[in-house]
């Protein structure tokens, strides 16, 4: 018997009920992160993070970088070999696409220097973000 989902995404995917608890922890000042089962999504886990909100004065790029770095660490810790990563902060949280892309590229270079992750794929929602990430990855030596 399956338990009821904690919430349902826009496309109807069902997520593990532990998601609500993990997301509450992500709102703490230390920005705790966690992984849960993926419900009906075509993957094993979902790693959760909440980016800093520029509109609320959360403007430290190091905090943004930690969202990417820590999420990749959590993915490695659960045994993921590949991971899809969004442009954390580049949407409603108000970070500039170029800054998010540069921070994400730098964090990814650092995280993939250690063994464990074979593929980090950025999943982006606009042509503007795609261009920003393509340029940032090239600056960091990733083609």
Image (tube, rainbow, N blue to C red):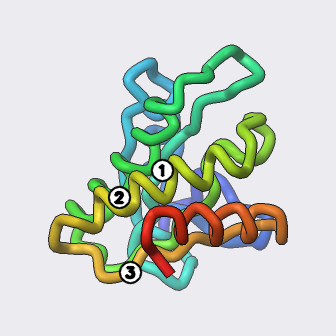
Locate residue 137 relative to residue 14 in the image: left or right: left
| Mark 3–mark 2 CB contact (< 8 Å) | no
Can you identify the residue that label 1 sits on? Answer: 48
Q: Quadrant of residue 25?
A: top left
Q: Residue furthest top?
A: 57
User: Which element type, helix, strand or loop, lies under badge 1?
Assistant: strand
Circle 2 residues within 10 Å: few <14, some 14–19, many ≥20: many
Q: Which mark is residue 72?
A: 2
Locate residue 52 relative to residue 120 in the image: left or right: right
Can you identify the residue that label 3 sits on? Answer: 119
State which tag comes first along the sequence, 3 or 2.
Answer: 2
Q: Residue furthest right?
A: 127
Q: Residue furthest left?
A: 115
Q: Please indicate, yes or no, whether residue 47 appears anywhere in the rendered image.
A: yes
Vertical relation: 4 (above or below) 69: below
Vertical relation: 124 (above or below) 40: above
Q: CA distance from mark 3 to mark 2?
A: 11 Å
Q: Quadrant of residue 115?
A: bottom left
Q: Residue at x 71, y 17 (%)?
A: 56
User: Which element type, helix, strand or loop, lies under badge 2?
Assistant: helix
Residue 94 on image: x %, y %: 77, 35
Locate residue 111 relative to residue 97 in the image: left or right: left
Q: CA distance from mark 1 to mark 3?
A: 18 Å
Q: Which mark is residue 87?
A: none
Vertical relation: 116 (above or below) 65: below
Q: How many marks?
A: 3
State which tag comes first along the sequence, 1 or 3.
Answer: 1
State which tag comes first along the sequence, 1 or 2.
Answer: 1
| Mark 1–mark 2 CB contact (< 8 Å) | no
Residue 71 on image: x %, y %: 39, 52
Q: Residue at x 30, y 82 (%)?
A: 118
Nearer to us in this view, 67 or 21: 67
């Amino acid at each position: 018997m399956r338990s009821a989902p904690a919430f349902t995404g826009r496309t109807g995917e069902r997520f593990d009920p532990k998601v609500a608890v993990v997301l509450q922890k992500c709102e703490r000042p230390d920005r705790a992160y966690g992984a849960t089962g993926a419900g009906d999504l075509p993957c094993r886990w979902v790693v959760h993070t909440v980016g800093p909100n520029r509109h609320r004065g959360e403007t430290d790029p190091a905090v943004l970088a930690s969202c990417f770095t820590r999420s990749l660490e959590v993915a490695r810790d659960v045994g993921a070999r590949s991971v899809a990563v969004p442009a954390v902060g580049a949407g409603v949280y108000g970070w500039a696409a170029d800054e998010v892309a540069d921070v994400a590229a730098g964090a990814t270079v650092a995280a993939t220097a250690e063994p464990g992750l074979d593929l980090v794929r950025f999943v982006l929602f606009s042509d503007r973000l795609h261009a920003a990430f393509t340029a940032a990855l090239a600056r960091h030596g990733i083609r």
